Structures are given as C-alpha cells and as structure tokens.
Image: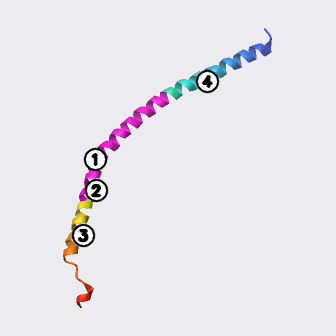
Amino acid sequence: MDITQIVVIISLLAITTVIVWTGVYLIKLLKELRITVSTTNQIVSSVSGPVTSVSEFLMGFKNGFSVFNSFFKKDKKEK
C-alpha cells in the first residue's frame, strides 16, 4: 500500500467515527429534550389551573365592584 492510501483510509475512519459519535449524541440529546418538554408540560398544566381560577375570581370581583359602584353613582347634574 501506498502512503497516500493509508492516509485516506485513516482519514475516512476518523471522519466516520466522528459522524457516528455525533449521531449517537444527537439521538441521546433528542431523547432528553423530549423528557424535558414532557416534564415542563406537566408543570405548566399543573400551574395553569390555579392561575386560571385566581384570574376568574379577580375578574368576577372586578365586575361585581363595577356593578356595586353603578348603584351608588352620583350624577353630576344634581348639583
């Protein structure tokens, strides 16, 4: 074998090894990302319920207060 052929074979083996290692790393990264997104989705779902309830309570309180104020609203024309 010629020295050029040996260098080409070694280079191809090195490039193939790097590509395979990168592929395996990418697959592991995507699996971990899927787990993280799933966990984050569960956390957001568990937080959104109470936040929605508080928001509805505050909107009801605001609407009730505005109705209460409309009963006791003083007309400017009476003066």
Which residues lie in the magenta part? 28-57
Vertical placement of residue 50 versus 40, above or below: below
Up-down: is 22 above or below 41? above
3 or 2: tag closer to the N-terminus = 2
Q: Label 4 near label 3: C-beta < 8 Å? A: no
> On the image, numbered disc 1 is attached to which residue?
49
Tell which tag, 3 or 2, sits nearer the viewer.
Answer: 3
Q: What is the x, y in percent for residue 8?
A: 74, 17
**Which-is-in-front pick, marks 4 and 1?**
1
Side of 4 where 71 appears, left or right: left
Query: Looking at the image, which residue is at 45% across and 29% down?
Result: 31
Secondary structure under badge 2? helix
**Disc 3 to disc 2: CB gap under 8 Å:** no
- Quadrant hosting residue 40: top left
**Can you identify the residue that label 3 sits on?**
66
Q: Nearer the viewer, mark 3 or mark 4?
A: 3
How far apart marks 4 and 1 lie (CA) works out to 45 Å
For mark 4, give the secondary structure. Answer: helix
Residue located 53% across and 27% down the image: 25
- Which residue lies at the image location 70% right of the left edge and 17% below the top edge? 10
The reply to whether the magenta stretch includes residue 79 is: no
Real-space CA distance between mark 2 and mark 4, rounded to the nearest whole angstrom = 51 Å
Closer to the chain start, of discs 1 and 3, is: 1
Establish if 76 lies above or below 70. Answer: below
Amino acid marked by disc 4 = Ile
Which badge, 1 or 2, is on the more N-terminal residue?
A: 1
- From the image, which quarter does the C terminus lie in? bottom left
Three-letter residue code for mark 2: Ser
How far separated are the C-alphas under marks 1 and 2? 10 Å
Q: Position of residue 44 (x, y in %)?
A: 34, 44
Mark 3 is surrounded, within 10 Å at the Cα level, by few (under 14), some (14 to 19) or many (20 or more) other residues, namely few
